[in-house]
């Protein structure tokens, strides 16, 4: 099976399903301005990596992926709201995201803040209202996701990131903290949430946690590299931002080549961790390679 697995087809199929579900779960409503702003960023493309991780992990643990679709879409809503808020003038102050003008550039800061808030709240409503799984699993997923975006997760990571801008005293430990919380926490929550919807046991969850921590860090290392080596046309957002904001990054610490090989090593370890699942692990193992090889 390893040779016959077609990751591109797998990603295309799940991406298409996620796009359709996102559009259906968040139709226009009243007041139209806020629904338009929420849909503008949510349906603006993006790799859809987090929802695909939810679905792949649910599948790995023997669940029906469709059961995890509300969770998959909720994770994408949370991710999108974090991008909207991250782009605001008070944060990273960016004009482009996913190849389009940022939310606040189109709708104004007031509506962009509210669009993020609306997406965050609706994400949890969606999981609670639409997940056809035993209630104890649904509660666990909500708890896990809420924690991943809280001050113990994304919010905390963003605060330390803001504090570290232009700070010559920044250390590797601070950098690790930021990325574990800002980036890896939601990737980990995505993988674990899919497994929980499928009814995974403690041992499976622990292996998936280790896998996620590796791919989370690998994802961020590649993100830092792409900020240096890629173009706005390829990434759909401004490049060279870390240098401009005088941020400590992995390539700054280790150089681009060492950073690249560390990311590859992390992905290889992630694949190794899942070996116990045999062929069922192939999609998540292929996704680890994709995270390191990605060009956007
Ligand atoms: C979550 C309540 C709450 C508030 C948000 C602004 C903020 C607090 C956190 C910032 C989080 C952030 C923007 C992290 C960066 C993560 C990252 C590497 C994003 C890029 O992800 P991709 O490459 O993007 O998957 P696409 O567009 O492909 O989805």
Image (cartoon, helix red, strand yellow):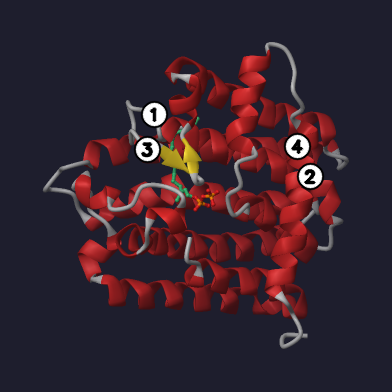
Q: Give percent across and percent down for residue 179.
A: 39, 51
Residue beneath label 4, please? Answer: 23
* Marked residue nearer the N-terminal end (1 or 3): 1
Residue where numbered disc 1 is placed = 88
Q: How far is the residue under mark 2 from the one under mark 4?
A: 5 Å
Task: Say how many tags the image has.
Answer: 4
- In primary-sequence order, the first of circles 1 and 4 is 4
Residue at mark 2: 20
SS under mark 2: helix
> 10 Å neighbourhood of mark 2: few (<14), some, or many (≥20)?
few
Q: Do the residues labelled 1 and 3 touch (CB within 8 Å)?
A: no
Which part of the image, by quadrant, shows the N terminus? bottom right
Residue that numbered label 3 is attached to: 158
Decide which of 30, 193 is in the foreground and name it: 30
Does ligand 1 reach within 8 Å of label 3's beta carbon?
Answer: yes
Q: Are circles 2 and 4 on residues that touch, CB within 8 Å? A: yes
| Residue positioned 48% across, 53% down in the render | 184
Tell me residue 115's x, y (percent): 56, 23
Whether the residue carrying mark 1 lies under 8 Å from ligand 1 is answered with: yes
Q: In which quarter of the image is residue 234?
A: bottom left
Q: Closer to the observer: label 2 or label 3?
A: 2
């Amino acid at each position: 099976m390893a040779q016959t697995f077609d990751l591109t087809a797998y990603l295309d199929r799940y991406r298409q399903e996620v796009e359709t579900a996102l559009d259906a779960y968040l139709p226009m409503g009243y007041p139209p301005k806020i629904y338009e702003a929420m849909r503008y960023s949510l349906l603006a493309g993006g790799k859809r990596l987090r929802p695909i991780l939810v679905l792949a992990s649910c599948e790995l643990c023997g669940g029906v992926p469709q059961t995890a679709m509300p969770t998959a879409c909720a994770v994408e809503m949370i991710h999108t709201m974090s991008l909207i808020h991250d782009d605001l003038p008070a944060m990273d102050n960016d004009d482009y995201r996913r190849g389009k003008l940022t939310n606040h550039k189109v709708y104004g800061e007031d509506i962009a803040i509210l669009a993020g808030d609306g997406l965050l709240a609706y994400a949890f409503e969606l999981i609670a209202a639409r997940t056809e799984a035993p209630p104890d699993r649904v509660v666990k997923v909500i708890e896990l996701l809420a924690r991943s975006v809280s001050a113990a997760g994304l919010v905390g990571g963003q605060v330390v990131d803001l504090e570290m801008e232009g700070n010559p005293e920044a250390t590797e430990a601070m950098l690790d903290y930021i990325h574990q919380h800002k980036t890896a926490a939601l990737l980990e929550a995505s993988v674990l949430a899919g497994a929980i919807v499928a009814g995974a046991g403690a041992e499976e969850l622990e292996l998936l946690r280790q896998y996620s921590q590796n791919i989370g860090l690998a994802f961020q290392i590649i993100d830092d590299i792409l900020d240096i080596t890629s173009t706005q046309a390829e990434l759909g957002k401004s490049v060279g931002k870390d240098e401009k904001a005088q941020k400590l990054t992995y390539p700054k610490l280790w150089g681009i080549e060492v950073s690249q090989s560390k990311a590859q090593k992390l992905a290889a370890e992630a694949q190794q961790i899942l070996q116990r699942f045999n062929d069922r692990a192939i999609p998540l193992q292929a996704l680890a390679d994709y995270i390191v090889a990605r060009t956007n």
